[in-house]
Structures are given as C-alpha cells and as structure tokens.
Image (cartoon, rainbow, N blue to C red):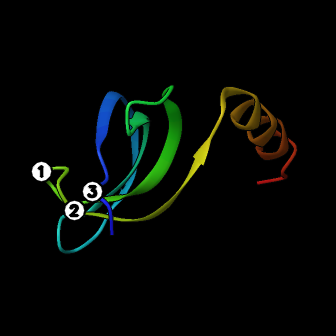
C-alpha cells in the first residue's frame, strides 16, 4: 500500500469520544497534496492512526446539511 499523506488544515469539531480516547471528528483535510475536503472519521489522540471515514466536497457537505436540517429530531 502506498503511503498516505495528509494535512489537517482545520479541526471543525468533535462529535464523540470513545472509551479508548479515539475521537470522531469533522476536519478539513488535504489528502496527498490535493484540494482540502471535509472529512469525518475516528482519530487517535495524536492524529497518527485513523479509522475508516468519509470525505465531502463543500457542495456535498451543504447538501448533507440540508438533509440533516430536514430531520425531525
């Protein structure tokens, strides 16, 4: 597997924290030097190890926000 390079440009917020200290975070991340995308995934406390996640362009995040705003919670 090729090395995965990333740079967290902005930590937007933490959604939850697990018993072992891993946090589910929304961050703006540049992957392999590309344009930053919004990224939702679990991270260890040093941001070295990560879980599987999902990335969003700005347009996708706006659409997700509209969907979430429409939920009756």
Q: Earlier in the sequence, mark 1 or mark 3?
A: 3
Q: Is residue 9 left or right of residue 72?
A: left
Q: To which quarter of the image does residue 13 belong?
A: top left
Which residue does the image show at 51% across and 25% down from the upper left? Answer: 35
Q: Are marks 2 and 1 in contact (CB under 8 Å)?
A: yes
Residue 68 is labelled as: none
Place of residue 21 in the rendered image (x, y in percent of width and height, measured from the top left): 18, 64
Image quadrant for the N terminus?
bottom left
Q: Is residue 14 left or right of residue 61?
A: left
Question: Label 3, on which residue?
Answer: 3
Mark 1 vs mark 3, CA separation in Å: 18 Å
Which residue does the image show at 38% across and 30% down from the upper left? Answer: 33
Image quadrant for the C terminus?
bottom right
Residue 46 is labelled as: 1
Of tags 2 and 3, the one toward the viewer is 3
Place of residue 29 in the rendered image (x, y in percent of width and height, measured from the top left): 41, 35
Q: To which quarter of the image does residue 20 belong?
A: bottom left
Question: Label 2, on which residue?
Answer: 49
Taking depth in this image into account, of 16 and 11 the one nearest to the observer is 11
SS for dot 3: loop
Say few, some or many: other residues with alpha carbon within 10 Å of mark 3 (under 14 / 14 to 19 / 20 or more). few
Which residue does the image show at 49% across and 44% down from the upper left? Answer: 39
């Amino acid at each position: 597997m090729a090395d995965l390079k990333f740079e967290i440009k902005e930590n937007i917020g933490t959604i939850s924290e697990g018993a072992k200290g891993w946090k589910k975070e929304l961050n703006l991340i540049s992957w392999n030097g590309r344009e930053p995308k919004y990224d939702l995934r679990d991270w260890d406390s040093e941001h070295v190890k990560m879980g599987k996640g999902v990335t969003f362009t700005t347009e996708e995040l706006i659409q997700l926000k509209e969907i979430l705003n429409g939920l009756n919670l």
